[in-house]
């Protein structure tokens, strides 16, 4: 049985939805890039899962500051925490926003290496 292609208006609506999803992803990436502490947290979590205290030590900030930024990153859907007894360990969530952010970071690092 031959399937007919969707009407133009369906294709137009589908493209519009995909563009909106991409814009939301870009806004979330901007919210991380514009926050140096959040950016450093993402970079640290690329290496391994870490607790709030470990993250604070790794990026050079106080634990309450790291905790506050982790709350924002959780709300953005970029990290998740898992409680193990009394300690919450954080990790990056796979998904398009984290993938886009990692691509931006890689591009920035390549530019720095090329010009430096």
Image (cartoon, rainbow, N blue to C red):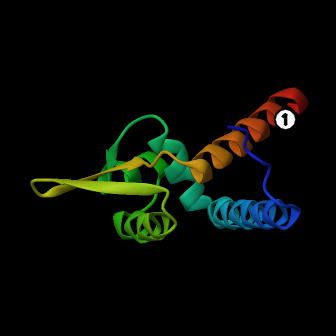
In the rendered image, residue 33, in percent from the top left (x then y), is placed at: 68, 59
User: Image quadrant for the C terminus?
Assistant: top right
Toward the top, the furthest residue is 114
Q: Position of residue 97 (x, y in %)?
A: 61, 53
Residue 51 as seen in the image, left or right of residue 45: left
Q: Quadrant of residue 15?
A: bottom right
Q: Position of residue 69 (x, y in %)?
A: 47, 67
Q: Residue at x 65, y 67 (%)?
A: 31
Query: Looking at the figure, which quarter contains the N terminus?
Result: top right
Q: Quadrant of residue 52?
A: bottom left
Residue beneath the point at 43% across and 69% down: 65
On the picture, is 45 further left or further right than 99? left
Side (left or right) of 63 relative to 20: left
User: Camera-side residue: 11 or 22?
Assistant: 11
Residue found 39% across the figure and 51% down from its top: 55
Looking at the image, residue 29 lies above or below residue 99? below
SS class, disc 1: helix
As drawn, is 96 to the left or to the right of 107? left
Crowding at dot 1, Cα within 10 Å, few <14 / some 14-19 / many 20+, comes out as few
Location of mark 1 (residue)? 111
Taking depth in this image into account, of 84 and 21 the one nearest to the observer is 21
Percent coordinates x, y for residue 67 in the rendering: 37, 66
């Amino acid at each position: 049985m031959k399937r007919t292609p969707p009407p133009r208006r369906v294709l137009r609506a589908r493209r519009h939805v995909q563009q909106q999803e991409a814009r939301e992803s870009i806004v979330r990436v901007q919210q991380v890039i514009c926050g140096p502490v959040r950016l450093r947290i993402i970079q640290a979590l690329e290496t391994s899962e870490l607790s709030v205290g470990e993250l604070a030590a790794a990026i050079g900030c106080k634990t309450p500051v790291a905790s506050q930024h982790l709350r924002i990153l959780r709300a953005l859907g970029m990290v998740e925490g898992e409680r193990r007894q009394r300690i919450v360990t954080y990790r990056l969530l796979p998904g398009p926003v984290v993938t886009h952010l990692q691509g931006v970071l890689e591009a920035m690092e390549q530019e720095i290496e090329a010009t430096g």
